Amino acid sequence: MARIIVVNSGKGGVGKTTTAINLGASLNKLNKNVIIVDANLNTPNIGLQLGAPIVPVTLNHVLKGKADIEDAIYEHSSGTKIVPSSLSIKELTKFNTKRLPEIVKKLATLCDYVIVDSAAGFGEEVIAVLSVADEIIIITNPEMPAVTDALKAVKVARQMGKEINGVIVTRHTQAKYEMPLSSIKSMLESQIIGVIPEDKAVKEALNLRDAVCHTHPKSRVSKKYYEIARKVSGEKVEEKRKLLEIIFGL
């Protein structure tokens, strides 16, 4: 049975989908069988970002009972598998989000890891995928509004009895105006398992419609995602920490 990891955040635009894609792709590089699920049903991006914006069968079709989940799995050229949601406005209604847990559990019998990219906030589809999660990774930016919303996500997950695997801080520049990593760790009462630097390679990968760890494997951001994937898979990662990181309490 696969580990079901839900990538969650309190707000949109913090790098949740980018993280889900690159965590899954990096685990795939570690020879893990991975399925990435786009459970952001209203504003899906997984298929778009991986070069498959329009496919015959999507998660929406499965939720409506029009197809089996096996029919909605597509394999990327890298070997990473994805279950995209529909970009069609016509598919935004009349799907049964209560079926999400059973669908995700079925996917868990087919691979080593199911990485679920949830919607932002705390709607029905978010609660549904959180209910089936084995563990949750919270994504935030180093700014107070994002961390405040991340705290809400942490509290909701813990109220549901779910384990917080850790926090990933994205778009980090070490600027003075950013919230210190030690403060983020303290506020969220969770370990920070990765800090993703601001890197133009991410935007270039978006334009290329692929994971940054595929398009720019030697970039700083790709190396960080690979490091996080190794941690998630249980490997002991020896980190060469800079003085500033030690001071900030990572």
Image (cartoon, rainbow, N blue to C red):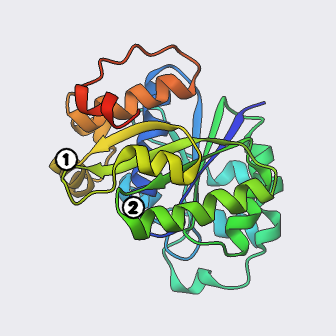
Q: Quadrant of the N terminus?
A: top right
Residue 25 is situated, as x and y percent measured from the top left of the image, at 44, 35
The residue nearer to you, when weighing 81 against 206, is 206
- Name which quarter of the figure residue 196 lies in: top left
Residue 26 is situated, as x and y percent measured from the top left of the image, at 43, 31
| 16 left or right of 219 in image | right
Q: Amino acid at mark 2?
A: Val
The residue nearer to you, when weighing 223 against 74, is 223
The tag on residue 199 is 1
Q: Amino acid at mark 1?
A: Asp
For label 1, the SS is loop
Q: Quadrant of the C terminus?
A: top left
The answer to whether one can see residue 13 in this image is no
Q: Which residue is mark 2?
A: 14
Residue 185 is situated, as x and y percent measured from the top left of the image, at 49, 45
| 81 left or right of 94 in image | left
The image shows residue 13, relative to residue 245, as above or below, that is below
How many numbered marks appear? 2
Residue 71 is situated, as x and y percent measured from the top left of the image, at 67, 52
Q: Pointer 2: residues within 10 angstroms few (<14), some, or many (20+)? A: some
Cα distance in 3D space between marks 2 and 1: 14 Å
The image shows residue 62, relative to residue 23, as above or below, that is below
The residue nearer to you, when weighing 88 against 167, is 167
| 146 left or right of 124 in image | left
For label 2, the SS is loop
Residue sitting at x 79%, y 45%: 106
Residue sitting at x 21%, y 46%: 174
Seen as rendered, the residue at the extreme front is: 247
